[in-house]
Image (cartoon, rainbow, N blue to C red):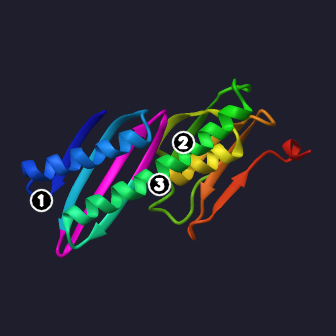
Amino acid sequence: MQVSITGRHVELTDPLKNYVHDKLQHLKHSFDHVLDVHVVLSIEKFRQRCEVNMQANGINIHGSHETEDMYASIDGVVDKLNRQLKRYRSKLQKHQGQNSQRKGREIKVSHRVLDLAQEKDELSEDHAPNIVNHEHINALSMSVDEAVMQLELNESQNVLFFTNEETDTLNALYRRADGTLSWIEEPDAQQ
């Protein structure tokens, strides 16, 4: 397990680093596929925050906790991550029992972020907005339950494209402003 620790407005002392490493080793006991962990410790006024981004078995897991004590914040985020990893492991075992081999296909999806802020009130018909960001996303084959689990485990991700293994069609799952999840699928796939 590769661990990197970053401090924002906090001095990273050896006892603090050792405490983080010791706590993260407990996560390895509950889930042995943890590959890469990035920890950010920050202090803002009286708030001491610990954020952890973890890559485990092809998924990204994010957790954060904030208290008035840095050690308590570290304990809190490790507890959250431990619960998430245990939930993920149990769902993974359930799905592996049902489907020993994945079927379906992987689809590549293109995602573009457009800059719609314009200086003019009226735009010509041939005007095209500027592309701010363009990325390609692999829509992996998975069940809807797996997609929900993956989006719940990664709090920083708001949209997940996936190939529904039951219908072999492109689906999307997104987090709404109120925190609920919405699922989009092709209308023909429901039949």
Residue 146 spot, x, y in % from top left: 64, 43
Q: Is residue 158 visible?
A: no
Residue 136 spot, x, y in % from top left: 53, 33
Looking at the rendering, which quadrant does residue 24 occupy? top left
Measuring 54% from the left and 45% from the top, which residue is drawn there? 88
Q: Does the magenta stretch include residue 61?
A: yes
The local crowd at label 2, few if under 14, some if 14 to 19, many if 20 or more residues have their Cα within 10 Å, is some
Measuring 61% from the left and 37% from the top, which residue is drawn there? 93
- Magenta stretch, main secondary structure, is strand
Q: Is residue 19 visible?
A: yes
Real-space CA distance between mark 1 and mark 2, rounded to the nearest whole angstrom: 34 Å
Residue 1 spot, x, y in % from top left: 31, 33
Measuring 70% from the left and 53% from the top, which residue is drawn there? 183
Residue type indicated by callout 2: Arg
Real-space CA distance between mark 3 and mark 2, rounded to the nearest whole angstrom: 10 Å
Measuring 22% from the left and 73% from the top, which residue is drawn there? 68
The disc label shown at residue 10, or none? 1
The reply to whether discs 1 and 2 touch (Cβ–Cβ < 8 Å) is no
The magenta span reads 44-62
- Measured along the vertical axis of the image, is residue 143 above or below residue 81? above
Residue type indicated by callout 1: Val
Q: Label 2: which residue?
A: 89
The local crowd at label 1, few if under 14, some if 14 to 19, many if 20 or more residues have their Cα within 10 Å, is few
Is residue 59 rendered to the left or right of residue 167?
left
Label 2: which secondary element: helix
Q: Does the magenta stretch include residue 51?
A: yes
Real-space CA distance between mark 3 and mark 1, rounded to the nearest whole angstrom: 27 Å
Which quadrant of the figure contains the C terminus? top right
Q: Label 3: which residue?
A: 83
Of labels 3 and 1, earlier in sequence is: 1
